[in-house]
Amino acid sequence: MTLRDVVDMGNMFFRVYILCYAVFMFFAALAGALQLEERDRAERFHSKLGLNNAMNYLPISILVPAHNEEVTIVDSIKSLRRQDYPNYEIVIVDDGSTDDTTERLIEEFDLQRVDRPIRRQIPCKNAGGIWESRDKGVRITLIYKENGGKADALNMGINASRFPYFVCIDADSVLQRDALQKMIAPIMEDDTVIGCGGIVQLANTAVIEDGEVKKIFYPRKFLVIMQLLEYCRTFLGARLLLNLFNGNLIISGACGLYKKDIVVKAGGYDSNTIGEDMELVVRLHAYCRSNGIPYKMVYAPEVVCWSQCPERLRDLRSQRIRWQRGLLQSLEKHRHILFNIDYGMVGTLSIGYYLLMEAFAPFLEALGLVFILLAWHLEMLYASFMVKYFLLFTAFSALITLTTFFSRMYAQPIHMSVWQVLMTVLMSFVECFGFRQLLSWWRVKAFIGYRSNRHVWGHIRRSQHQRLAKTADRDGQGGMQG
């Protein structure tokens, strides 16, 4: 076999790979748009199963793991206390913070130290102190514990929670006021639902005062715009397609609801991984299928959680390397599922997508560049065809991004100015030149030192939500009215 034969085979492989990717993303965008339309109709005309009657609600525990979150924690808890839901509690677990996270919470919400036992159904590190609210409103429990990581903090929260369902939310996140109502709705419709995830929106694009979203604006920071487009493509594309056959492998750690007894039986969160959200979902799939338990894990895009995205390159780099390593850990730990037909579409299409289109995609992209160089060296490269093909694929990619982005605008709904629409169209093309390649390079770096750095979390700088109210006019040109 000659080098030319190898290049021909490589070219054939990449044609098939790109075709499969394009077909998947096309159907993902189409499925997302159709599901959003269907859900919007149901929202307007369905009776909501009598959820307006408080007797029909299931009680929920909201778990908030926190580590050095003094900047945003108070605003987040204020937003949680304003949920339009009749029966829920808030359990905050301070995972050994070295700042004033615990002190700020005690002062702001007038918490009182108590002595109460915590039943350890799943392993977690020891608690150093427990505080509870004294007013008759939403019950707040604060636990200060030894540092053990986010997964360990969530396990402590599960042990301390009182109710049969729990929602995990990041300490820098803000739930929309109707989020709990909409998260519990799929469970009210189908009691086999054991998990429900929502869409994560960027708090960097919202004015948040006293824990409530007051206004949504269009960002001017290039890095935030890029992530805004990426989030729309992810949450309103691939995840909605996988949702059609119970194939989602990720419920975002920023906003997810679970049935507690199933999670406890499956062993709780794995404190030996930094991708605890995906690992838990994959393990629940495996646990339920192995034990013959009927189950569903659903994705509800009408559930909105606002979370801060990185505004500095170094923070974005840290976040994406951690995400990639968390993905690799989940796939490695549950490799028995890989292409195992006993796990149905989860073991084939879902795992295949995350393995080929997410985990190994940056290596395939690098390999593609090698084949292009080889083809050029062997004079097998037709420059005009290559340029046209690249521009066509860029236009297709931008179209997919725009479809999911404007589906989001329709679903909320949000009114945009002509300038904002034109800027979004432009940025959907610009994203293909540099930003995606940078993300791919960081994902490659996640493999480097994977074994030695697999438990390194990294640090991301947080900003106060209230700051947005003061700088919305400066950071956004015009407002996107929600």
Image (spheres, helix red, strand yellow):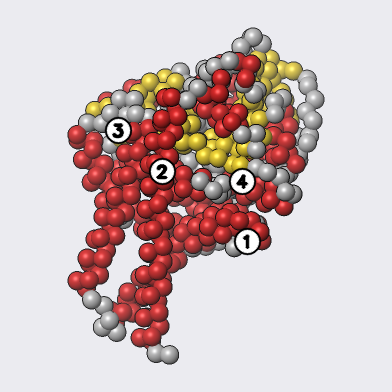
Classify mark 2: helix, strand or loop.
helix
Residue projecting furthest to the top? 136
Mark on residue 281? Answer: 4
Residue at the image point whose x is 26% and y is 55% from the top: 395
Q: Earlier in the sequence, mark 3 or mark 2?
A: 2
- Give residue 471's position: percent from left, percent from top: 31, 26
- Give residue 430's position: percent from left, percent from top: 26, 51
Residue type for callout 2: Gly
Above or below — where is 327 with respect to 464? below
Which marked residue is nearer to the observer: mark 2 or mark 4? 2
- Give residue 153's position: percent from left, percent from top: 66, 36
Q: Which residue is mark 3?
A: 218
Residue at the image point whose x is 71% and y is 45% from the top: 293
Callout 1: few (<14), some (14-19), or many (20+) C-alpha neighbours within 10 Å? few
Left or right: where does residue 203 sit relative to residue 49? left
Classify mark 3: helix, strand or loop.
strand
Left or right: where does residue 17 sit relative to residue 78? left
Which marked residue is nearer to the observer: mark 1 or mark 4? 1
Q: Earlier in the sequence, mark 4 or mark 3?
A: 3
Q: Which residue is mark 1?
A: 341
Mark 1–mark 2 contact, CB under 8 Å?
no
Q: CA distance from mark 3 to mark 2?
A: 22 Å
Mark 3–mark 2 contact, CB under 8 Å?
no
Residue type for callout 1: Ile
Above or below — where is 434 with respect to 141? below
Classify mark 4: helix, strand or loop.
helix
Q: Which residue is mark 2?
A: 32
Name the image quarter holding the N terminus. Answer: bottom left
Residue type for callout 3: Tyr
Residue type for callout 4: Val
Q: Quadrant of residue 125?
A: top right
